[in-house]
Amino acid sequence: MTFAPRPIPKAVRARIGIGSPRRDDRSRHNLGLPGQASVIGNRPLLLVAATRDSPDEDVPMYTRMAKTLREAGAKQVTLVTHDDDHPFSSHRIALASVLTHWLRANCTKK
């Protein structure tokens, strides 16, 4: 199985501020998530967080993101956390295993 991520459509990139020359705090942290949930819809989404990551990318931020997306209608949001640093230095094999299983379960044609 080959997995090649699709590019993010320009309309979505514009709504969440990717590539925008000016990104204020709200757009950087909120990313317009309620609006993006409808774009995500039934597509599976895997969020992976590390407990010793920076404060703006820590587990509580990912937990809020998952909750916001679910409340706004995203149907297949999976949140995985590891007690590790940002590059998952001591959990790389576990992370690879989680990702492989998640891809097989959510991204293969049945």
Image: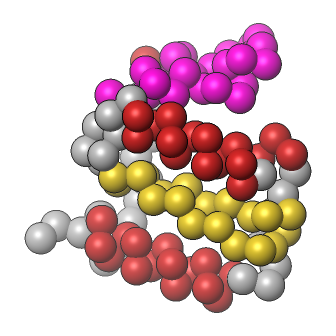
Above or below 82: residue 62: above
Give whichever of 64, 53 is nearer the camera: 64
User: Residue 51 sits in which quadrant?
Assistant: bottom right
Q: Main secondary structure of the magenta part?
A: helix
**Outermost left residue:** 110
Give whichever of 51, 108 is nearer the camera: 51
Could you tell me which residue is drawn at 38 percent across and 70 percent down? 103
Relative side of 1 to 52, left or right: left
Relative side of 32 to 76, left or right: right
Q: Quadrant of the N terminus?
A: bottom left
Above or below 56: residue 92: below
Above or below 90: residue 54: above
User: Residue 81 sits in which quadrant?
Assistant: bottom right
Residue 39 visible in the shown view: no
Could you tell me which residue is drawn at 70 percent across and 73 percent down? 82
Q: Which residues are magenta?
A: 12-38
Residue 45 picture location, percent across and down:
42, 52
Residue 16 visible in the shown view: yes
Give whichever of 5, 67 is nearer the camera: 67
Residue 37 picture location, percent across and down:
39, 32
Residue 5 picture location, percent across and down:
43, 53
Could you tell me which residue is drawn at 58 percent across and 40 percent down? 65
